[in-house]
């Protein structure tokens, strides 16, 4: 009788034990989801102590049996598969943390944002590249390519544009920005991204509001671990440099950094679209950035006179400095025909004519009539047959190059009647008149000038 009662009690205790452990496993899953690893360890210690007390309580009554301990199995609560899966994930993360507890991890933006940024436009990296992100080890700088951390889900957020580095988690979340009252979501698009082997790319993201209302007038893009991540490992957040978000209506007037040759000239700093300086340049036949650069290299003094009082000396320096950031890959070919008459051309490596030079006078290509364009093509063909006479024309002014040419070809020669300056300068922005021009190819009104100093097209004197 006593033996039967003991067996019944052992079965009852075994069922009780398994039931308790099942509920504990489910409860631990919730703890892992909501608490840090330190809190989980404390809970586990308390559970272990409770089990030990329960075990000791049955020893005096001789209800403890070796088979009882061997028969116990920890079973998750199968009635809630999501919690069971969560518990399994937390256990995997805990094992990874145990093996890598000394590793300091950091999220990182690997691509700089393309500036300026406008509302309604997709965020892009520099030169239109995708915005690349990565999870790295702080000490090594290497990408974390394996383990549960290498495939975590991340959230993209908007931050205040205030200065500051190495924010703790609380400070990072404190700087997160929400939309203005009455406005829609500030950043729309795919605000979640999942890493693959430690790297990823941001999806389409668009600002719906400008940053003018913000305290710092600027925003940052931030990157943090998504809320459903089991936070056993502290992963530092990432943030971009601060930037302004402008209204899309200003996109038509935006400046380009760097400008391209075919950009309208108002894309340059200090040239407002349809402003006084813009109108003066258009009147002089300067419509594109390449027109501005060509004139600046051929006759900078005359270009400055065209703009006149509409631009200050300080703004002129800013304008020229910005224009010079344009990549031109231009070539210069010059030769002297009979009677020392100079002809040549300025062209690109793709054989696009920029300027024709006849009798030492520079003629802008975009204003040439059909016959003059044919002359320019012939000069380019001649240049490609004589590559040794072709020079780079990307930084120096025309007069600087001419000084070098003359000093190398005529080191001791002085032209008749010229004792100090053998290179008088003449520049013509518009083309010379072609014979009987008709139709849409007829040239525009000539706009020319003569300068006596550097930065101009050269006209060698006729004999």
Image (cartoon, rainbow, N blue to C red):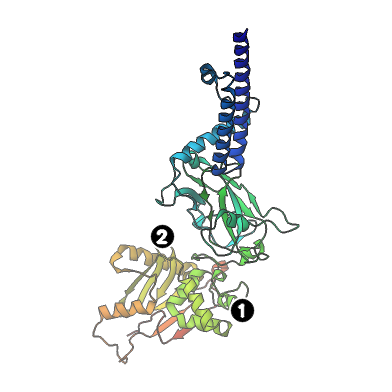
Q: Earlier in the sequence, mark 2 or mark 1?
A: 1
Task: Determine which residue is flagged by label 2.
Answer: 350
Residue furthest toward the right? 182
Residue 247 occupies which quadrant of the picture?
Answer: bottom right
Position of 334 compared to 208: left or right?
left
Q: Compared to 295, does 247 lie above or below?
A: above
Residue 390 occupies which quadrant of the picture?
Answer: bottom left
| Place of residue 352 in the rendered image (x, y in percent of width and height, measured from the top left) | 43, 63
Task: Determine which residue is flagged by label 1.
Answer: 276
| Place of residue 33 in the rendered image (x, y in percent of width and height, measured from the top left) | 60, 39
Eye-nearest disc, 2 or 1? 1
The residue sitting at 57% across, 18% down in the picture is 62
Position of 355 compared to 14: left or right?
left
- Asked if one can make out residue 121 in the rendered structure from this viewpoint, the answer is no
Q: Compared to 217, does 47 lie above or below?
A: above
Secondary structure under the numbered disc 1 in the rendered image: helix
Q: Mark 2 touching mark 1, by CB under 8 A?
A: no
| Place of residue 454 in the rendered image (x, y in percent of width and height, measured from the top left) | 40, 83
Q: Compared to 60, does 184 lie above or below?
A: below
The residue sitting at 30% across, 64% down in the picture is 387
Disc 1 packing (10 Å; few <14; some 14–19; many ≥20):
some
What is the CA distance from the residue labelled 2 to the residue labelled 1? 34 Å
Position of 273 compared to 95: left or right?
right
Secondary structure under the numbered disc 2 in the rendered image: loop
Position of 199 compared to 424: left or right?
right
Residue 451 numbered mark, or none? none
Residue furthest toward the left? 412
């Amino acid at each position: 009788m006593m033996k039967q009662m003991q067996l019944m009690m052992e079965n009852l205790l075994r069922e009780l034990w398994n039931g308790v452990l099942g509920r504990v496993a489910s409860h631990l899953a919730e703890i892992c989801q909501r608490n840090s690893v330190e809190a989980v360890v404390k809970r586990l210690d308390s559970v272990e102590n409770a089990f030990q007390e329960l075990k000791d309580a049955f020893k005096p009554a001789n209800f403890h049996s070796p088979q009882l301990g061997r028969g116990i199995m920890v079973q998750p609560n199968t009635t809630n598969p999501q919690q069971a899966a969560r518990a399994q994930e937390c256990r995997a993360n805990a094992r990874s943390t145990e093996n890598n507890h000394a590793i300091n991890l950091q999220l990182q933006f690997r691509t700089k944002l393309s500036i300026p940024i406008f509302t309604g436009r997709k965020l892009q990296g520099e030169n239109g590249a995708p915005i690349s992100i990565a999870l790295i080890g702080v000490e090594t700088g290497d990408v974390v390519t394996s383990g549960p951390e290498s495939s975590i889900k991340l959230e993209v957020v908007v931050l205040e544009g205030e200065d500051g580095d190495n924010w703790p988690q609380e400070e990072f979340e404190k700087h997160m920005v929400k939309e203005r009252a009455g406005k829609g979501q500030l950043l729309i698009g795919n605000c979640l991204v999942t890493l693959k082997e430690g790297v990823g790319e941001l999806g389409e993201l668009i600002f719906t509001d400008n940053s003018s209302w913000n305290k710092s007038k600027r925003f940052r893009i931030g990157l943090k671990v998504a809320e459903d991540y089991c936070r056993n490992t502290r992963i530092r957040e990432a943030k971009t440099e601060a930037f302004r978000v402008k209204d899309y209506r200003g996109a038509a007037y935006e400046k380009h950094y760097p400008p391209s040759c075919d950009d309208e000239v108002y894309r340059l700093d200090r040239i407002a679209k349809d402003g006084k300086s813009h109108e003066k340049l258009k009147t002089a036949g300067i419509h594109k950035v390449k027109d501005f650069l060509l004139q600046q290299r051929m006759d900078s003094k005359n270009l400055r006179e065209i703009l006149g009082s509409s631009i200050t000396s300080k703004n002129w320096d800013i304008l020229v400095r910005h224009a010079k950031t344009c990549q031109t890959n231009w070539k210069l070919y010059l030769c002297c025909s009979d009677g020392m008459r100079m002809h040549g051309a300025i062209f690109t490596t793709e054989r696009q004519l920029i300027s024709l030079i006849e009798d030492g006078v520079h003629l802008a290509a975009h204003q040439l009539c059909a016959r003059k364009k044919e002359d320019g093509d012939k000069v380019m063909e001649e240049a490609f047959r004589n590559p040794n006479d072709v020079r780079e024309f990307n930084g120096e002014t025309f007069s600087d190059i001419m000084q070098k040419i003359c000093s190398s070809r005529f080191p001791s020669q002085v032209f008749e009647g010229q004792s100090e300056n053998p290179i008088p300068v003449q520049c013509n922005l518009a083309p010379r008149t072609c014979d009987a021009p008709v139709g849409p190819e007829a040239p525009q009104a000539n706009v020319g000038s003569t300068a006596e100093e550097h930065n101009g097209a050269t006209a060698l004197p006729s004999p």
